[in-house]
Structure formats: structure tokens, C-alpha cells
Image (cartoon, rainbow, N blue to C red):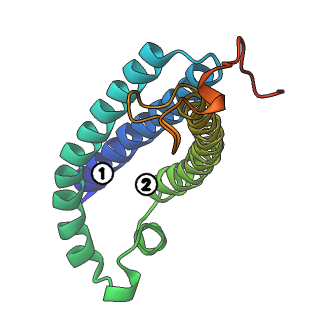
């Protein structure tokens, strides 16, 4: 059983590494959003997809290691959690898994916070983009259909703004 616990700890360490990469990627996405660098944002998103794919592939290995441990320790259904496994495991694996759990919670919270901030930035950018497009559409219209009831051009198509910004 010691070999299985050791293998599980190695799998958990690899998962922590992946989640730290996710945290770093979402931080890089944040920088790309703030710099309005669409190419960099796309590259970071592709990296994120790759890490997620790695995580999904590693999940099978982790589950395969957990099953014999759950049976060996006789864990009840409600105790089949990482905390339950930590409680049942002997040292030094108990300490390794506890450290993993603490570090994973910290990394996940950092990632969660950064993703929320990225989401706010993107929503803000989208709001201003939509506002700008609405102004452009109002001023430039959609073409020949932009005539008033008497067949002339509406006044907003005759005087167009030279510069539009969010400050007015």
C-alpha cells in the first residue's frame, strides 16, 4: 500500500504543478487584457486549454490509485474525500497530502480571484466596445435605408463626429 500512497502523492504533486501553471496563465491573461493584446490573450488561452487537457488525462490515473486506497482503509462513502484519506493515511504520506491540500486551496483561491478580475475587465471592455459600436451605427447607419420620411438623409448622417471617445 506504501507504493500506492507514494504514487498518489506524486500524482497530487503533478496536479499542484498544473494548477500553479493555471494560476500563472490566468495572471498572464490579465496582463494581456490590460494591454489589449488579443494575440497574447489567445496564446495564453491556448496554453490554458493544454493544461486543462493534461488535467483531464491525469484524472484517470488519480482515480485508479484512489480505488485500492479507499478499499484498503475501508473508507465509508462520506469519508471518500481527500480529507478522509489524509485522516486514514500513515506518515509521511499524511503530511504530504495535508500540505498538498493546503497549497492546492491557496492556488485555487488565487486563480479564482484572478479569473473574477479578468471577467470584470472583459465585461468592462465589452460594454465600451458595444457602446462605441452603437455610436458608430447611429452616426454612420447601415446605408441606403437611412432616409427620413421625406426621402432625405436624416440630420445625424450629415454631420459626423471627427473623434469619439468614452469621455465625450
Q: Residue 76: in sight, yes or no? A: no
Kindly identify the residue that appears in the image at 53 percent across and 35 percent down: 23
Q: Nearer the viewer, residue 96 or 141?
A: 141
Say which of marks 1 and 2 sits in front: 1
Q: Residue furthest front?
A: 150
Residue 8: image tag = 1
Which quarter of the picture shows residue 72? bottom left
| CB contact under 8 Å: marks 1 and 2 | yes
Element at label 2: helix
Element at label 1: helix
Residue 93: image tag = 2
Q: Earlier in the sequence, mark 1 or mark 2?
A: 1
Residue 58 placement, left or right of 165: left
Kindly identify the residue that appears in the image at 58 percent across and 37 percent down: 134
Q: Nearer the viewer, residue 119 or 19?
A: 119
Which quarter of the picture shows residue 79? bottom left
Percent across and percent down for residue 98 are 54, 57
Amino acid at each position: 500500500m506504501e507504493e500506492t500512497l507514494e504514487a498518489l502523492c506524486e500524482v497530487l504533486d503533478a496536479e499542484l504543478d498544473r494548477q500553479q501553471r493555471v494560476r500563472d496563465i490566468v495572471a498572464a491573461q490579465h496582463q494581456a487584457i490590460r494591454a489589449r493584446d488579443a494575440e497574447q490573450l489567445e496564446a495564453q488561452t491556448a496554453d490554458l486549454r493544454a493544461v486543462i487537457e493534461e488535467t483531464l488525462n491525469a484524472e484517470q490515473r488519480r482515480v485508479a490509485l484512489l480505488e485500492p486506497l479507499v478499499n484498503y482503509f475501508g473508507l465509508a462513502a462520506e469519508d471518500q474525500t481527500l480529507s478522509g484519506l489524509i485522516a486514514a493515511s500513515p506518515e509521511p504520506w499524511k503530511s504530504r497530502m495535508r500540505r498538498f491540500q493546503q497549497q492546492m486551496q491557496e492556488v485555487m483561491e488565487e486563480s479564482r480571484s484572478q479569473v473574477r478580475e479578468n471577467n470584470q475587465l472583459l465585461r468592462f471592455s465589452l460594454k465600451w466596445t458595444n457602446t462605441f459600436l452603437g455610436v458608430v451605427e447611429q452616426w454612420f447607419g447601415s446605408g441606403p435605408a437611412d432616409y427620413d420620411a421625406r426621402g432625405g438623409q436624416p440630420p445625424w448622417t450629415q454631420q459626423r463626429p471627427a473623434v469619439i471617445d468614452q469621455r465625450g
